[in-house]
Image (cartoon, helix red, strand yellow):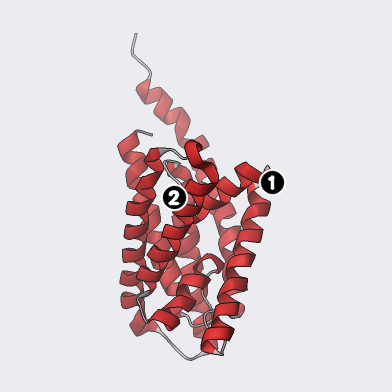
Amino acid sequence: MKLYKKIGVFFAGLFFCGFGTAICTQADLGTSPISSLPYVLTFVTHLSFGTTTFIVNMFFILAQVLLLKKDFKKIQYLQIIVTLCFGFFIDLGMYLAEPFKMNVYANQLCMLFIGSAILAFGITLEIIANVMYVPGEGVVKAISQKTQYKFGKVKVLFDASHCLLALLISLFVLHAVHGLREGTLLSMLLVGNLVIVYSKIWDKMKRKFRPQISAVSKPAH
């Protein structure tokens, strides 16, 4: 895949991630683990979800710089632009999904599933593009690189600590639990498994169409 196509796929993935996160949140059953802290901060600061997401992700980029030092490549500063776009997509998604909010639990679960499916699709597109890390994944990779722990283990611990910090801020500042409910756990389980499903579908598509592409690109004799 050519670079401009990879960039296009990456930003398409970012778009779906923003919308998926917003729809999961508007289901009002708790947001995704990685978005739990920015969402709780919306209740503390009264800033938009996209804005608090941008602020938190700036700290993730700073953490990468401090951890990696000279190993932090300058191109990774483009994560700032990525985060600006992501924050915008979240706020746009929150606005568009607002009319679909419902108090019926079955409908909320349905909305959560749809949001998780969209979020997982966005993550899969980012994986396919493979051009850049979003700050949340970048800091996990940096910690993994410095500690020599596997990426998956660090990711689980990072998400758990993210939720714990969001819970502590919610309890001590707001004196109530905000943004963390059963939907947070459900979203985590759904998104992870759906990414696996989407990735398998993508692999099958590649195997199916690669021979055709090779045949077309083969020079005639």
The one of 46 and 96 positioned closer to us in this rendering: 46
Q: Residue at the location (66% across, 60% down)?
A: 157
Q: Position of residue 206 (x, y in %)?
A: 49, 38
Q: Position of residue 135 (x, y in %)?
A: 46, 53
**Residue 151 shows in the view:** yes
Q: Residue at the location (47% across, 73% down)?
A: 24
Instruction: Please indicate whether residue 118 sits to the left or right of residue 183 in the image.
Output: left
The one of 210 and 131 positioned closer to us in this rendering: 131
Q: CA distance from mark 1 to mark 2?
A: 26 Å
Residue ranking furthest to the top: 221
Judge whether 54 appears above or below 68 on screen: below
Q: Residues within 10 Å of mark 2 (few under 14, many from 20)?
A: many
Secondary structure type for disc 1: loop
Instruction: Please indicate whether residue 38 sits to the left or right of residue 200 in the image.
Output: left
Instruction: Please indicate whether residue 147 sits to the left or right of residue 128 in the image.
Output: right
Residue underneath mark 1: 149
Residue underneath mark 2: 125
Q: Amino acid at mark 2?
A: Leu
Judge whether 93 appears above or below 123 on screen: below
Marks 1 and 2, the one that precedes in the sequence: 2
Q: Amino acid at mark 1?
A: Tyr
Q: Residues within 10 Å of mark 1 (few under 14, many from 20)?
A: few
